[in-house]
Image (cartoon, rainbow, N blue to C red):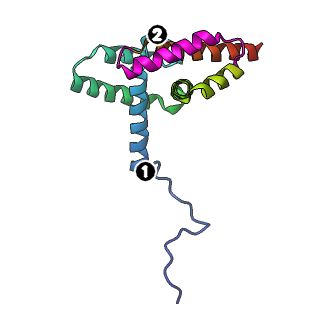
Amino acid sequence: MRPHDDRPRADEEEEDFGPSRSELRRNALDMLKLAGQLMDLPPSRIPKLKLPDDIVDEIGRTRKITAHIARKRQLAYLAKQMRRHGDAAFVDARAALGEDRDRQRQEAAHMHRLEAAREKLLTGGDEALGELFDKYPDLDRQHVRSIVRQARVERDANKPLHAFREIYRLLKELEASQADDAAE
C-alpha cells in the first residue's frame, strides 16, 4: 500500500485562487504610499505625471482638507480610487518619483562633499589650501586665505558664520565651473 500524497498530479489542473490576502494588503499599502507621495508633490508637477483625470481631481480635493483624521481618511479613499485603475496607470508617476529620489540623493551627496571640503580647509591648514590651489591654479589665493582665516575666527568666537558660508559658495562655484569646462 502506498502512502497518501496530497500533491496535485500532473494530469490534474490546479485551481487559481488569485492573489493572497497578504499580497492584496501589500499592494494596498504600496498604493497608499504612492498616494501620499503624490500629495507631497507641488501642484504644478501633478499634470506632468500623466495621471487619470479623476485621480487628479481627487488629489485636488484631498489637498483642500486640513483636519488630520479627515485628511488621512481622504488619502485612504484616494488610494482606493487609484487601486481601481491598477498599477499600469501609475507607472509614469512611480518612475518620476524614483527619479526625484535619485536626484535628491545625488544633490545631498554633492552637498556633503562640499561640506567635507570646507571642513578640510578649516582644519587642514596650509596643506589643504595647497591642495585647493593645485586643483584650481587661477584661484585668488589672498582672498581664499582671508575667508578661511575669517571663518576660523568666526567659528571660534561663536559669531555668525558669514565667511563659513562664503567658503561653501566658493567651493560650489569652483566645482560648477569645473563641470562646465568638462562639458565643453
Was residue 6 drawn as part of the magenta stretch in this picture?
no
Q: What amino acid is found at the position of numbered circle 1 in the picture? A: Ser
First in sequence: mark 1 vs mark 2: 1
Question: What residue appears at the point 29 percent right and 13 percent down from the top-left corner?
Answer: 64
**In the current view of this chain or complex, which residue is farthest to the right?**
184
Measure how far apart labels 1 and 2 are at the Cα level. Answer: 38 Å
34 to 55, vertically: above or below: below
Q: Which of the pair 160/111 is nearer the observer?
A: 160
Q: What residue does disc 1 label?
A: 20
Q: What amino acid is found at the position of numbered circle 2 in the picture? A: Ser
24 to 78, vertically: above or below: below
Q: Which of the pair 12/128 is nearer the observer?
A: 128
Q: Quadrant of residue 60?
A: top left
Please report the bounds of the magenta region as a residue range.
136-160
Horizontal and vertical percent position of residue 33: 40, 32
Was residue 140 drawn as part of the magenta stretch in this picture?
yes
Q: Quadrant of residue 177?
A: top right
- Secondary structure under tag 2 reads helix
Q: Nearer the viewer, mark 1 or mark 2?
A: 2
Horizontal and vertical percent position of residue 131: 66, 26
Q: Quadrant of residue 114?
A: top right
Label 2 CA crowd tier, 10 Å (few <14, some 14–19, many 20+): few
Q: What residue does disc 2 label?
A: 44
**In the current view of this chain or complex, which residue is farthest to the bottom?**
1
Q: Is residue 31 visible?
A: yes
95 to 43, vertically: above or below: below
- Secondary structure under tag 1 reads loop
Horizontal and vertical percent position of residue 146: 54, 12
Question: What residue appears at the point 46 percent right and 48 percent down from the top-left corner?
Answer: 19
